Image: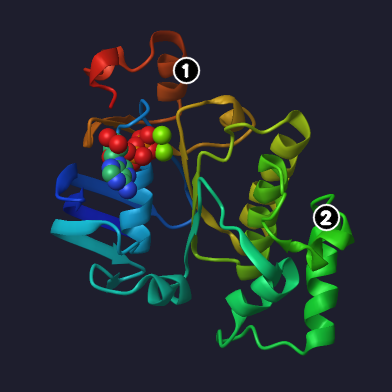
């Protein structure tokens, strides 16, 4: 059964069509990977699935957990159990990380917590991710390294326990330590809530120890191929040219 089902999706940003008639399915409980060269439209697909209003859906439907969410706001999609990690996480000067995390669970069914309980919970998760407690009182994103931002995303993921987590380019610019935290976060998410994962990447390093069920390949805004995990090795060996990608068509 599909948790996320995308049919005939076309989408534009600033009048320019980026996604062309995309079909995409992620069944419940599986680990999927979306790959493709830079500029293919992978990040766009994540944002359109999440309902980022900067992108205009010009055709098709997005169904999540049995509900047509094509017209839903980002906030409603989030409450329905969809999670997107951002390639460039937000910086909000003056807002401590702990307040930001508190706000993300505010008013969510089943997530009511007293402040004390909330502090204990996020401290637990921070420890699990090798994050210094002091971070929780630091301003959100300000002066955080790329790796630190990724740790914050993993903390958010484990706190929210969404039904589907779309993780965009979590491997780019991460040192070995941060990479292991992201892997740990993904594993904990899978184990604790039988989470469904869609990992968007053009780099296969983070996938090495993951049990990948299915791989989707996007080239120039279109789905170009899909298959089992063996596609990853095929891409490592031969790149994206085999799917009709040429270097000068990348952007
Ligand atoms: P990928 O994640 O596969 O590298 P993106 O989805 O980021 O690809 O980009 C796909 C195409 O859409 C690129 O040509 C990019 O320049 C364009 N694009 C994406 N977001 C925007 C935006 N906000 N404004 C203008 N063009 C955009
Ligand atoms: Mg890119
Ligand atoms: Mg991208």
Secondary structure of the residue carrying tag 2 is helix
Distance between the alpha carbons at the discs numbered 2 and 1 = 31 Å
Figure label count: 2
Answer with left or right where residue 237 lies relative to residue 24: right
Quarter of the picture holding the C terminus: top left
Q: Taking 178 as reference, is 203 above or below it?
A: above
Residue at image mark 2: 128
Q: Quadrant of ligand 1?
A: top left
As drawn, the label of residue 233 is 1
Please indicate, yes or no, whether residue 95 appears anywhere in the rendered image: yes
Answer with left or right where residue 117 lies relative to residue 151: right
Provide residue 232's location: percent of width, then percent of height: 45, 23
Q: Residues within 10 Å of mark 2 (few under 14, many from 20)?
A: some
Toward which corner of the image does residue 102 lie, by quadrant?
bottom right
Provide residue 56's location: percent of width, then percent of height: 20, 58
Q: Taking 220 as reference, is 185 above or below it?
A: below
Disc 1 under 8 Å from ligand 1? The reply is no
Secondary structure of the residue carrying tag 1 is helix
Whether tag 2 and tag 1 are in contact, CB under 8 A, the answer is no
Provide residue 218's location: percent of width, then percent of height: 29, 33
Residue at 60%, 36% in the rendered image: 210
Residue at 74%, 71% in the rendered image: 98
Task: Using the image as rendered, state which of residue 62 and residue 90 is in the foreground.
Answer: 90
Residue at 75%, 29% in the rendered image: 176
Q: Residues within 10 Å of mark 1 (few under 14, many from 20)?
A: few
Quarter of the picture holding the N terminus: bottom left
Please indicate, yes or no, whether residue 41 appears anywhere in the rendered image: no
């Amino acid at each position: 059964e599909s948790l996320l089902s995308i049919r005939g999706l076309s989408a534009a940003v600033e009048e320019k069509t980026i996604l062309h008639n995309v079909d995409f399915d992620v069944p419940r409980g599986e680990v999927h990977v979306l790959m493709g060269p830079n500029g293919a439209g992978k990040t766009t697909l994540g944002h359109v699935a999440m309902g980022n209003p900067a992108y205009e859906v010009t055709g098709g439907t997005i169904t999540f957990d049995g509900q047509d969410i094509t017209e839903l706001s980002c906030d409603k999609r989030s409450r329905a159990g969809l999670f997107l990690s951002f390639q460039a996480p937000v910086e909000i000067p003056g807002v401590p990380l702990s307040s930001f995390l508190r706000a993300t669970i505010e008013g969510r069914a089943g997530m009511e917590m007293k402040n004390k309980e909330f502090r204990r919970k996020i401290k637990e998760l921070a420890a699990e991710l090798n994050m210094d407690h002091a971070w929780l009182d630091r301003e959100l994103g300000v002066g955080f390294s790329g790796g630190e931002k990724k740790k914050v995303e993993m903390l958010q993921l484990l706190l929210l326990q969404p039904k589907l987590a779309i993780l965009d380019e979590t491997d780019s610019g991460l040192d070995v330590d941060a990479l292991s935290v992201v892997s740990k976060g993904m594993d904990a998410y899978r184990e604790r809530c039988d989470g469904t994962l869609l990992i968007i990447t053009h780099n296969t390093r983070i996938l090495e120890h993951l049990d990948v069920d299915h791989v989707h390949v996007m080239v120039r805004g279109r789905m170009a191929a899909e298959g089992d995990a063996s596609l990853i090795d095929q891409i490592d060996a031969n790149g994206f040219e085999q799917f009709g990608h040429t270097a000068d068509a990348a952007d």
